[in-house]
Structure formats: C-alpha cells, structure tokens
Image (cartoon, helix red, strand yellow):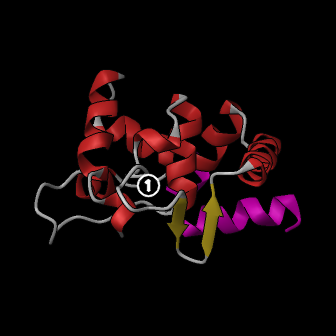
C-alpha cells in the first residue's frame, strides 16, 4: 500500500490541526475509537487503514483534501494513482471522474440528523433494532 506509507502521520497532523480527538474522528467515520488509534499507530505491525467510505467521510466532513492524507507524489509514479482495482491518470478524464464522484457523494451524504439517527441505531440493542425495523416495515 505505497500510497498509505505516511497516512498515520498525516492523519494525526490533520486531526491535531483541527483540534479533533480520536473519538471525534471515530464518530465522523462511523467507527470505534480503537480503529482510529490503530490508523495512527507508529508501529506498522499494529497499524490498520480505513476503508474507502470511512476515508471519504473524514475528508468530506472535515473538508480535508484526500491528497493531503495519501502519498500521491512518489517519484516514478508516471502520473498514476493506484488503488486496489482502480487506476487513474492525471488527465481531464480524472478530473471529470472526480467531479462525478463528488456529485454522487453529495447526493448520498447523510444530513447531521440522519447521521445521528444512524449512530443511535447502531448503538442500540439487537432487540431494539428489530423493533425499529418492524415499525418501519422493513
């Protein structure tokens, strides 16, 4: 994961610059605080990485450019960003693809109220979840 070599340090720098705790980042990303701590781990053997949705949530909600967290400028890249299953070049196609992605993300992005409801739903018991789903007819 060449593009995530310094992710742990970059995430910590952004988090501290924004005066956010690990718990704040966890809430933004919809994960447990322990996961955020492991994202920032100094020891590579203990380090994990966020999934794409958590990473995008963090970037969107903190208005942090994705490229400020990833190692995109490595020498010899040839203008390529390699992600598992994806390859993009630095062309107009990339710009339009990113604009489309941004539009799609904004279309499906939860409001603060929806995010709070989802957070509460996730924290409730399995029995309460079933009851809520029955009431909603799901």
- The magenta-colored residue range is 120-138
Give the structural element (helix, strand or loop) at label 1.
loop
Residue appearing at x 39%, y 40% in the figure: 25
Q: Nearer the viewer, residue 136 or 21?
A: 21
Residue appearing at x 77%, y 48% in the figure: 92
Residue 120 image position (x, y, % from top left): 57, 46
Q: Is residue 59 visible?
A: yes
In the picture as drawn, the residue positioned furthest to the left comes out as 43
Q: Quadrant of the C terminus?
A: bottom right
Residue 46 image position (x, y, % from top left): 17, 68
Residue 114 image position (x, y, % from top left): 71, 40
Task: Determine whether 86 is above or below 59 in the image.
Answer: below
100 to the left or right of 72: right
Residue appearing at x 52%, y 36% in the figure: 65
Q: Nearer the viewer, residue 93 or 135?
A: 93
46 to the left or right of 106: left
Give the prevailing secondary structure in the magenta stretch. Answer: helix
Q: Nearer the viewer, residue 138 or 73?
A: 73
Task: Determine whether 107 is above or below 79 in the image.
Answer: above
**Residue annotated with mark 1:** 31
Is residue 82 one of those drawn in magenta?
no
Residue 61 image position (x, y, % from top left): 56, 33
Residue appearing at x 43%, y 54% in the figure: 31
Q: Nearer the viewer, residue 80 or 67?
A: 80
Q: Quadrant of residue 95?
A: top right
In the picture as drawn, the residue positioned furthest to the bottom comes out as 85
121 to the left or right of 42: right
Task: Determine whether 98 is above or below 122 in the image.
Answer: above
Is residue 127 one of those drawn in magenta?
yes
Q: Is residue 124 visible?
A: no
């Amino acid at each position: 994961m060449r593009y995530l070599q310094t992710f742990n340090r970059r995430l910590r720098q952004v988090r501290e610059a924004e005066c956010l705790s690990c718990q704040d980042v966890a809430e933004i990303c919809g994960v447990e605080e322990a996961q955020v701590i492991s994202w920032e781990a100094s020891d590579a053997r203990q380090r994990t990485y966020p999934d794409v949705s958590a990473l995008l949530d963090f970037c969107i909600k903190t208005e942090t450019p994705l490229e400020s967290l990833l190692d995109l400028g490595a020498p010899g890249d040839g203008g390529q960003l390699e992600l598992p299953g994806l390859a993009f070049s630095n062309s107009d196609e990339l710009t339009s693809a990113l604009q489309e992605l941004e539009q799609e993300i904004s279309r499906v992005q939860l409001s603060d109220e929806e995010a709070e409801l989802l957070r509460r739903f996730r924290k409730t018991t399995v029995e309460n979840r079933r009851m809520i789903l029955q009431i909603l007819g799901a």
